[in-house]
């Protein structure tokens, strides 16, 4: 590999900037209007220049795409809409050659209803042993007409679907915590465990540097699958954070550690308490997990400081690096979130139509980017964050593809608004998402005014969001990632976040309307927006702005 970050004692995943590629919306190489591996391979130089350390690819496997690829029919091959296995192998090699690590998405909680195991389970009839790899159960009620328990799918509606047997009679029900096309796997079954261990080896042998584990908190279910009941305790649900799940990660960790290089697991762990979350990060389990607290927090200095403190305190006892996430393919783009009256995020109520002042939102998003990039630990950049893209809130109903839209009866407009294909050029029918002359249009339409947000439009503008990210990522790599994973808060006015790290680094985010003085005796190296001067000619930091400064004379 070339151009690796400077050597530090800590493994790369402790301080990596990881770029999330939602493959179908990143870049279309073959002109069918859907992003693919060819498109991603073409853009590797862009990603290297951006300055991230690793790429996380959302599922690229064979899939009927009932949930954007999180319904996997073959974990060892690539969906033809994205390319071929040979292309994935080339992509991994080429990314490495550009100094970029590769993380693939592993989806172990459920597979697709088109997966051979589930087809076999359906075809085999009620007594088929193939059904034991899933959760098939008889229904309740006199004729089995009611679901086996009261669990609700995360996508809305019951978490059970009743099958129709070969002779046309209604049969048992199967569990799916997400869409009906995503049957949950039974992790008590040894074949399920063996299969996923083999899948890990399959991709490790192909050189991947790590795995993002989908729904990492959900694999194990409480014995007997008891009802949740009318007043559930969110810290003790029968379908998440059941202790047996930790045994799975302990066995996976042994597999990973037997490979050379610094390979890593990052868990998607959504749990109500920091203590529950941290248990996944014990030294013999996952290396890190997405910390969604900042993503859910409002733009409020007190709350953000609490989030940072709570996060550092939760990770310290298990020795895991914290991570910082502002957005991903399931949430609302933070340019839009920060421009609303209520700047928090709630997965169960995304308030997708709430109005937003995206000018204000983008200013805050720039400040939030510098804040999170300054914190110790790892950081995630969701594709398009670096362009300042907003959520697309006016996609026509008939184009929405996310199953949450239909499953919720239209009350949740789903996650398509953060998945609109990226704009690369300021002209052309797909703004460069597809190659010139492509017959197909992008799978979701891009807003007309995204020409101004395209990579080409931002490339040479020193004040663009893109160049802010490039400069910040470069400074972070050369000056911050080697520092100890600690910070010290410094005294500041209300509604201001101000901290130092070693080597004389200061980060100040002003969330108050009053301009703030620069940290004393420091030199500004980067600011998320224009700075001002007070009556005495001293530089000040206006509201919704973050500034990075170093003590005068600090070594670089
Ligand atoms: C989390 C993924 O990020 C999301 O996109 C998906 O719908 C669910 N897991 C189910 O796999």
Image (tube, helix red, strand yellow):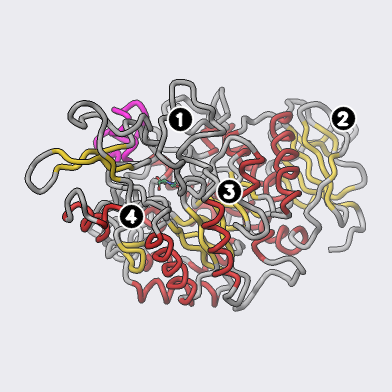
Report the Cα–Cα distance between label 2 and label 4.
72 Å
Q: Is residue 271 visible?
A: yes
Q: Which residue is mark 4?
A: 133
Residue 471, horizontal then vertical, whole percent? 67, 57
Q: Which residue is mark 3?
A: 290
Q: Which residue is mark 2?
A: 535
- Within 8 Å: ligand 1 and the Cβ of disc 1? no
Of tags 3 and 4, which is closer to the observer? Answer: 4
For the magenta stretch, what is the residue range? 394-412
Vertical relation: 1 (above or below) 494: below
Residue 210, horizontal then vertical, whole percent? 54, 65
Say whether disc 1 or disc 2 marks the residue closer to the N-terminus: 1
The foreground one among 293 and 272 is: 272
- What residue is rendered at 60% in x and 61% in y? 52
Q: Which residue is mark 1?
A: 348
Residue 151 within the segment the image draws in magenta: no
């Amino acid at each position: 590999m070339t151009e690796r970050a400077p050597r530090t004692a800590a493994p790369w995943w402790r301080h990596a900037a990881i770029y999330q590629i939602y493959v179908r919306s990143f870049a279309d190489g073959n002109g069918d209007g859907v992003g693919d591996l060819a498109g991603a391979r073409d853009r590797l130089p862009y990603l290297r220049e951006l300055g991230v350390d690793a790429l996380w690819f959302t599922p690229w496997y064979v899939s009927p795409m009932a949930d954007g690829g999180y319904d996997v029919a073959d974990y060892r091959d690539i969906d033809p809409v994205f390319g071929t296995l040979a292309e994935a192998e080339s992509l991994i090699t080429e990314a490495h050659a550009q100094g970029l690590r590769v993380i693939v998405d592993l989806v172990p909680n459920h597979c697709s209803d088109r997966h051979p195991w589930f087809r076999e389970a359906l075809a085999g009839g009620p007594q088929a042993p193939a059904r034991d790899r899933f959760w098939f159960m008889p229904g309740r009620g006199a004729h089995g007409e009611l679901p086996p328990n009261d669990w609700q799918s995360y996508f809305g509606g019951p978490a059970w679907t009743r099958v129709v047997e070969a002779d046309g009679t209604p049969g048992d029900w199967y569990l799916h915590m997400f869409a009906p096309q995503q049957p949950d796997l039974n992790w008590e079954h040894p074949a399920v465990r063996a299969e996923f261990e083999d899948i890990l080896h399959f991709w490790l042998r192909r050189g991947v540097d790590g795995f993002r584990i989908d729904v990492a908190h959900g694999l194990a279910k409480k014995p007997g699958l008891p009802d949740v009941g009318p007043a559930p305790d969110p810290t003790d649900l029968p379908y998440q954070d059941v202790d047996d799940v930790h045994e799975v990660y302990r066995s996976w960790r042994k597999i990973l550690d037997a490979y050379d290089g610094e390979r890593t697991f990052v868990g998607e762990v959504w749990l109500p308490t920091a203590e529950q979350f941290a248990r996944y990060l014990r030294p013999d389990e996952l290396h890190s997990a997405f910390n969604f607290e900042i993503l859910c927090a409002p733009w409020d200095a007190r709350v953000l400081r609490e989030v940072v403190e709570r996060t550092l305190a939760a990770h310290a006892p298990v020795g895991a690096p914290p991570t910082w996430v502002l957005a991903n393919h399931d949430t609302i783009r933070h340019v839009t979130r920060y421009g609303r009256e209520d700047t928090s995020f709630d997965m169960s109520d995304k308030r997708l139509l709430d109005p937003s002042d995206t000018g204000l939102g983008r200013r805050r998003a720039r400040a939030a980017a510098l804040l999170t990039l300054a914190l110790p630990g790892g950081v995630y950049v969701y594709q398009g964050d670096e362009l300042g893209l907003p959520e697309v809130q006016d996609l026509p109903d008939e184009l929405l593809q996310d199953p949450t839209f239909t499953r919720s009866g239209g009350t949740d407009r789903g996650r398509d608004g953060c998945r609109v294909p990226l704009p690369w050029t300021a002209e052309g029918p797909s703004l460069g998402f597809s190659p010139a002359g492509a017959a197909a249009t992008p799978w979701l339409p891009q807003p007309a005014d995204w020409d101004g947000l395209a990579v080409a439009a931002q490339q040479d503008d020193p004040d663009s969001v893109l160049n802010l990210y490039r400069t910040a990522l470069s400074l972070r790599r050369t000056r911050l990632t080697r520092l100890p994973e600690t910070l010290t808060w410094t005294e500041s006015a209300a509604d201001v976040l101000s901290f130092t790290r070693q080597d004389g680094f200061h980060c100040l985010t002003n969330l108050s309307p009053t301009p703030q003085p620069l940290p004393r005796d420091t030199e500004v190296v980067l600011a998320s927006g224009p700075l001002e001067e007070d009556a005495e000619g001293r530089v000040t930091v206006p509201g919704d702005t973050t500034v990075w400064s170093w003590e005068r004379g600090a070594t670089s």
